[in-house]
Amino acid sequence: MESNARYESRINRVIMKTFNIGREFSGDPAGRYRSDGGFNGERFREDVLRPLISQLKDNEKLILVIDDDVESYGSSFLTEVFGGMVKYGYITKLSLLDKVEFSFTDPDYEFYKNKAIQYINEAKFNSVQYIATKGP
Amino acid sequence: MATCKITDSCGPFITDSLPDTTGIEDRYSNFNNEHFTCIINSFEPLTSALPNMFSHLQSQLFLAIFTVLTAALAAYFFNHLHWISVRNKEKINHITSSTENLITSLEHEAVLYWLRSSKDIGATKSKAYEINLKSTLTSIRKHLIVISSKLNKKRHRRSLRLLNQWGSSIYDDVTGSDFESIQKEPDDVRASKIAKKCANMKSELISLSMQV
């Protein structure tokens, strides 16, 4: 009973922060680098995801709403965002998978969630040094 | 109850010792109570057997009706199953044919997209290609999910695995690398890889539609 109570209190203490990609970033996220358009993967990673994750406390998690107002994602965008977080050494795969959760109501978007997780798992931690690209 | 056999004692009405009468009125004139009782008595074995006979007939009738109903039900059931199978086969053929068309369209667009640089294609045309390719990939994925749901999980295990893997890998090939980039250069290897994968999937779908 006591251990259950502890577990529940630990669960209850986790705070979920939500970011809606379609409404707070863009309904048409596309491209890999800043030069590829206004709402590219590099921009999302550097200006949105990385700051959001770095601000999270131990008991906080980030929920990414991926299906609201977004038609689809290209592999280049998803790889740059999620694979890039690990590849550039910002966070380990396990920590990233622990901190970020994907939310969607449309079952078709489970595919993008699985691809994002696949890119996180395939990336090698801190294997590349990040060099910022310039926008158009 | 007394019994009586149909013999001479039954009188001229039954036997050949009938007086030589010329008309029916003479016959009836000889028909008295004694004869009637005798005739009725002669039917007694039959009447006593009737309940048993009816009971037997009833059970026979019930058996016959039961057999006919069971046969009809079985025929209906198998016919129903047959048509479910036929309709399922038609649906799979229809959706595989539709998926083949979508894959052909994807192959055509993706090869044209990857064989040229973004500069050669132009910004607007590139955007149109990218939008079309992403929506076609989404449609194909939905079709593959429907096909997978119609297939027997045990019998078509290999095909189900191939469909799933293909959907994921073609997405990486078509929308990976410099997809949606203004710096995209022609990538012949990627174009031929996409064409080959599309051809493989089309032949897999054809063989699948022949198997079901």
Image (tube, rainbow, N blue to C red):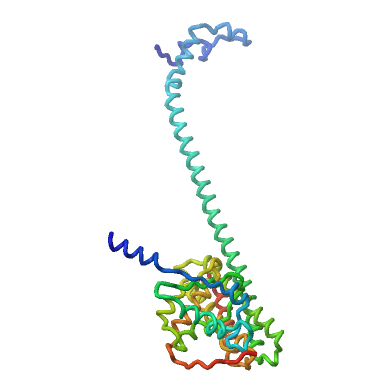
* B43 to B156, vertically: above or below: above
Which residue is located at x 48 percent, y 82 percent? Answer: A119
Of A109 and A67, nearer the camera is A67
Q: Position of residue B6 (x, y in %)?
A: 46, 16
Residue at the left extreme? A2
Nearer the observer, B77 or B20: B77
Q: Residue at x 44, y 79 (%)?
A: A96
Q: Is residue A42 visible?
A: yes
Residue A78 percent location from the top left of the image: 54, 81
Residue B212 visible? The answer is no
Tally of marks:
0
The percent coordinates of residue A33 (x first, y second) are 58, 88
Name the quadrant containing residue A15.
bottom left
Q: Quadrant of the N terminus of chain B?
A: top left
- Is residue A133 positioned above or below B199 on the image? below
Residue drawn at 40 percent across, 11 percent down: B2
Work out whether B150 lies above or below A96: above
Residue B176, percent across and down?
A: 56, 85
